[in-house]
Amino acid sequence: MLRIPARLAGLLTLALAGILMAPSAAPAAGRLGVMLPAHGGPLAQANATQDSLNWSGYAVLPSTGHRVTDVASTFKVPAVNGTTPGFAATWTGIGGYNSSDLIQAGTAEEYVTGLGPSYYAWYEILPASETQIANCSGDVNCTVRPGDTITVTIQATGAIQANQTWNVSIVDAGHWTYSIGLTYASTYSSAEWILEAPTVGAQTVMPMMANTTFDPNNTFTNDNGTAQNIGAGSPVEITMNSREGLPSALDVEGDGFNGCAYKLSCPAPAS
């Protein structure tokens, strides 16, 4: 996510740092939704681990001459437990690992002292900030609850072109569906499945929260071809500040993993 909605930016800053900011103050804009490496040097490219300040999960980079045109993810919305304030985002997207463009969609999981937990669904195309979705089929409020099963699909439609048309679909199983068409210029440079600590002017931290299960059918497609599991793409494993966010190993099918916050180890899903 690029930035936290302005309605919560000041309250979060106050809760985390003891610095007073008006609740309506807008957070700083900038290149904030892309992956921020924790250390200098070249980024990991394949079958390796990359430490990040804000992302945890997996990324797949296509080989030279190929482009990511479709990404899909199914995950369970993690519950925040109210022990500490913070923000998290669970999402899938295209771009942003080694580029400044990023098209992404998923859910937010928040806990702010005095307001309690909050969950909602959103999409985002950088450099614009997130758009919280509304008017879903089946529930006009697009209500998100911890434990809900969310499926996100982002797909390039038509011929691959500089100013690409995309379909973004978000489904909360048994509750509602949402779809929107967008036009966005992408580098098609990576596919990601991420648990993120977003940014409010400065880097935030995630709240204490349950594990996030990304499973099943977390896939990517190159060049409008056939969908492939994460494991088929020689993925980069991304850790957040070594321990703040830790992905498990992929499951035996290569299409799922757990995302763990503040854990010394993170077990893979059973299937």
Image (spheres, rainbow, N blue to C red):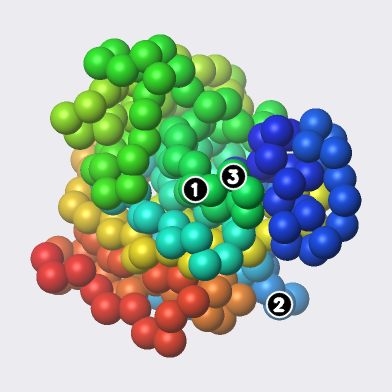
Disc 1 packing (10 Å; few <14; some 14–19; many ≥20) = some
Q: Is residue 122 above or below residue 111?
A: above
Residue that extends furthest to the left in the rendered view of this protein: 271
Give above or below for 138 relative to 220.
above
Residue at 80%, 31% in the rendered image: 24
- Separation of marks 2 and 3 at Cα, in angstroms: 35 Å
Tell which of 176 and 116 is nearer to you.
116
Question: Which mark is drawn over residue 115?
Answer: 3
- Compute the Cα span from label 2 to label 1: 32 Å
**Horizontal and vertical percent position of residue 97:** 58, 55
Amino acid marked by disc 2: His
Occupied quadrant, residue 213: bottom left
84 left or right, relative to 91: right
Dot 2, crowdedness within 10 Å: few (<14), some or many (≥20)? few
In three-dimensional space, the C-alpha distance between marks 3 and 1, rounded to whole angstroms, equals 7 Å
Q: Nearer the viewer, mark 2 or mark 3?
A: 3
| Disc sitting over residue 117 in the figure | 1
The residue positioned 49% from the left and 42% from the top of the image is 118
Q: Could you tell me which residue is drawn at 50 percent across and 31 percent down?
A: 123
**In this figure, which residue is indicated by the disc labeled 2?**
39
Asked whether 136 or 161 is in front, the reply is 136
Q: Kindly give the residue lying farthest to the bottom in the view shown.
A: 264
Amino acid type of the residue that numbered disc 1 sits on in the rendered structure: Pro
Quarter of the image where one finds residue 18: bottom right
* The label number, if any, that marks residue 198 in the structure image: none
Q: Can the viewer see residue 58?
A: yes
Which mark is nearer the camera, 2 or 1? Answer: 1
Q: Which residue is located at x 21 percent, y 64 percent?
A: 254
